[in-house]
Image (cartoon, rainbow, N blue to C red):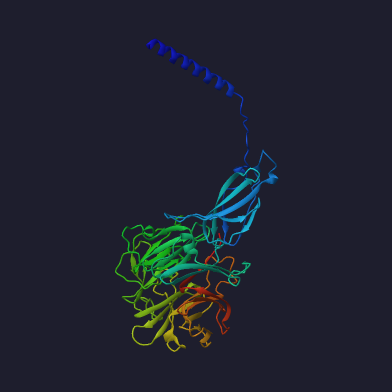
Amino acid sequence: MRTKIYKKIGIIAIAMLIFMTYSCKKDLGNYDYINTEVPQIDTTKVPLSYSVERYATIKITPTGIRYAAADTSRLTYKWLIYKVIVGTTTEIPVPIKISSTRNLNVKLDYPIGPYKLELIVTDPKNSLTSNIIFDLAITPNISTGYGLLVLHTKNNVSDVDFLLTKNAVPTATTDRWYKNIYSQVQGQSIFGEPRFIAASRRAFTTENWVTIGTSTHLTRVNGVDFSYMREDAGMFLRPGTVIAPQAFVLSSLSSNDIIINNKKIHFINSTDPLGNIFPGEVTGNYSLAPFIAEASSSSIVAAVYDDQRLKFIHPLSTNVMAEFRSPAATTQPFDLTNIGKTLIDMDRGFQSYTLSFFKDVTGSGRWLYVTNFNKTDDGLMAVARYDMTTLPNISNATIFRSSEYGNVVYYATPHDVYVYNFDSSIATFKGYTFPTAETITSMKIFKPKPNSSLSATDGTILYVATWDGSTGRVYELSINRSGGDSPVLLLNKFEGFGKVVDMASKGGGN
């Protein structure tokens, strides 16, 4: 019985083997294999990274496209742009079709920031595609440097705008207003109550950045595209530094970056590509008002005002604070070591003198002190003192700006700008009146540094910012930089800011 079963199993196995052998042999040669081509894009024929100013036109000509299966004339093209999402987020970039031609030639009216460009090449007959992706940076049009930076705030949110006008920069083809460039590049607005904005551009060096200070925050961004450089603790070498910035200046006279932070002064003289990092505060028992006077002496880095002891002091290059000398002659108009008044404002004026504006601690007195800090302290730095107490509406003046081309000062009350020719017989007069609903919040004379290509407009424009409780405005006014009785004329008005806290001229050059 068992022998019969084994015989049946053997017969079945042999039959299966014959069937499988026949099937495999029959399969040979039964299929046609087609080698289907797809459009090819040669990435060596075109750059893969682009940086284009906002509102400018981008042009890309992908010359290395080939298609072996058919004539390339039947191919279709689609260009997409999508924002690069910075940081951890659930946001998904949405591609936007910007062109359907092989060669891209499109004006980029998109917010500032990083993007990707994608070219998709398709054969519509068989739907086969290839693609290539490009890196794209859309930058603000501040690469040439010149213009006006505007720091403004509204609803506890602060940002920076950039104005470029033909009046200030004659080579500009049109007036341009770039809004909220800080948040567009950084992906977030500026936090803290805004204090100042300052531009640093030192010719023939890497120094080209913008420094912004608020009540609790200090940040530095690149002066070309506003990309991130440093912030807060990254700005100081000493750990644990309290972040409370008050004033900043790049001294064009001594080539120092100088900051007052938490009522103490820090300074550095270097051109670190990522932005100068400040060492520890200059030691000493002092408390500073938020103003810095430039100086050019090798021993005097800058002049500052001690608002506790009410006198000028200065840091030495050895990183210690020092007193100025008492007057070396009885003809000196004042004593730098004993001013005894409250400092309201400070600006650089004619002959690089420092103009300081004071009010009496008690009473209604208003004063202008002119000082020459651009030499070794010889006890003869005081140049002149002017009593401003009787000038029109001077008791309501809080902002003072000085020309560097003549002995003239512009001072602002809540609604008016006055022209004061000191050391002159010309009476002080009202230069411009603003609507009563608007209050002046900031005022700056256009003083770009360096100014090699703008010598004709340097000092000829006064920017005045106003606020009506909901809308900020910046007025562009023409002034006579040498003084005299010339009228102040309105050139432009830009409307739609938050409350403007500070403005800064941005210089250019190599």
Residue drawn 63% across and 57% down? 106
**Placement of 32 over or under 461, stated as above or below:** above
* Near-viewer residue (405 or 176): 176
> Can the viewer see residue 223 in this picture?
yes
Quadrant of image for the C terminus: bottom right
* Near-viewer residue (308 or 240): 240
The extreme left residue here reads: 285
**Tag count in the figure?**
0
User: x, y percentage for residue 473?
Assistant: 51, 76
User: x, y percentage for residue 200?
Assistant: 48, 63
**Placement of 220 over or under 425, stated as above or below:** above
* Near-viewer residue (435 or 223): 435
Residue drawn 60% across and 49% down? 119
User: x, y percentage for residue 114?
Assistant: 51, 55
The extreme front residue here reads: 1
Quadrant location of residue 146?
Answer: bottom right
- Judged left or right of residue 166, residue 351 is left
User: x, y percentage for residue 360?
Assistant: 36, 84
* Near-viewer residue (501 or 59): 59
- Judged left or right of residue 81, residue 498 is left
**Placement of 7 over or under 309, stated as above or below:** above
**Placement of 177 over or under 207, stated as above or below:** below
> Can the viewer see residue 275 in this picture?
no
Quadrant location of residue 367?
Answer: bottom left
